[in-house]
Amino acid sequence: MVSTLANFDTHHEDLIHDAQLDYYGRRLATCSSDRSVKIFGVTGNQQELIATLNGHKGPVWEVAWAHPKFGNILASCSYDRTVIIWKESSAGSEWNPVHEHSEHHSSVNAIAWAPHECDMPVLACGSSDGNVSILAFQDGKWTSTTIPKAHEVGVASVSWSLGPPAPSAPGVPTRILATGGCDNTINVFRFEHNNWTSQPEKLTGHTDWVRDVAWAPSLGLAPPTLASCSQDGHVFIWTNIGGKWTSVSIHDFHVPVWRVSWSVSGNILAVSSSDHKVTLWKAALDGKWYCISDVGEADDGAQGPK
């Protein structure tokens, strides 16, 4: 059974759209329509405001922590069409913007760091302009490449995975990126031969915006597995076997579903829906998915996402 560990006032002055713990679970970053990002130190049930980051000129939709092997780095994206990468000073006394990406022509809705096995910080950014930009820090500077027209009417979500090395690059995992769009579809891109290419066909099944996509952790010999959720109230589990994608709907929530997130072991899926509930789902031996826990608004006073 899931229980609430703590509730606290972030002192944001408007809706909170995202909250992310760092790798160690010791810091919490939040962002809001008040245009700010806040960072809290977390110790047990206690939270302490460490920093308030002001730099965006519009609502901030998401925040994302880089892997700690690259330092204390946080990214944020906003309606103001920018992505800001923040880094904590070596003294640990303040946070400063180290890069601002402003090449998109509309709201930047989603960001995600690539797995640390890429050996450099790599950030995917999905925008309402339909494009995905890939930011990478290499040779002391940030560079940007673009995946154009990932979704014609806008990108709502992005998620990374790694595949087996390509024959042309032995020992180097293949970067794989899934995107969910406002065209109700999911696209899967692979980075091979220094170029991003999409699979021949998009994944279809949702009937409204795909609000989130999330790759399951790759463990053992399990096939590539992707979860998606949509404004249409459905959550799908997609599995690729022999190059062919199949999907199953785990539940019709009858309300928009905002976020999906896998457990570290990849056998439990957390689902956040607009009825102020977080539910946990697990597949049984018969292949069907069952709800194993339900935390509602009455339990924890949770506020709906953006």
Image (cartoon, rainbow, N blue to C red):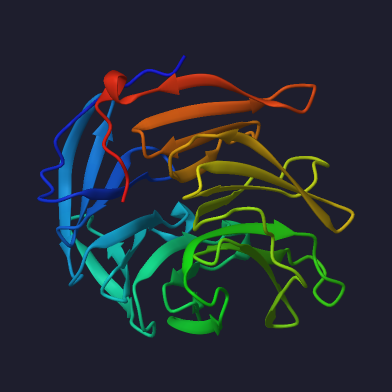
x 80%, y 74%: residue: 169
Q: Position of residue 187 (x, y in %)?
A: 64, 66
Count of numbered marks: 0
Q: Position of residue 211 (x, y in %)?
A: 47, 54
The answer to whether residue 263 is above or below residue 210 is above
Q: Position of residue 79 (x, y in %)?
A: 28, 69
The answer to whether residue 51 is above or below residue 9 is below
Please say whether residue 278 is visible from this viewpoint.
yes
Q: Is residue 166 left or right of residue 216?
A: right
Q: 49 or 239, which lies in front?
A: 239
The answer to whether residue 27 is above or below residue 17 is above
x 69%, y 83%: residue: 194
Please say whether residue 72 is visible from this viewpoint.
no
Q: Is residue 158 left or right of residue 38?
A: right
Q: Position of residue 18 (x, y in %)?
A: 32, 49
Q: 129 or 118, which lies in front?
A: 129
User: Residue 102's image quarter?
Assistant: bottom left
x 13%, y 48%: residue: 12
Q: Is residue 169 left or right of residue 248?
A: right
x 48%, y 83%: residue: 144
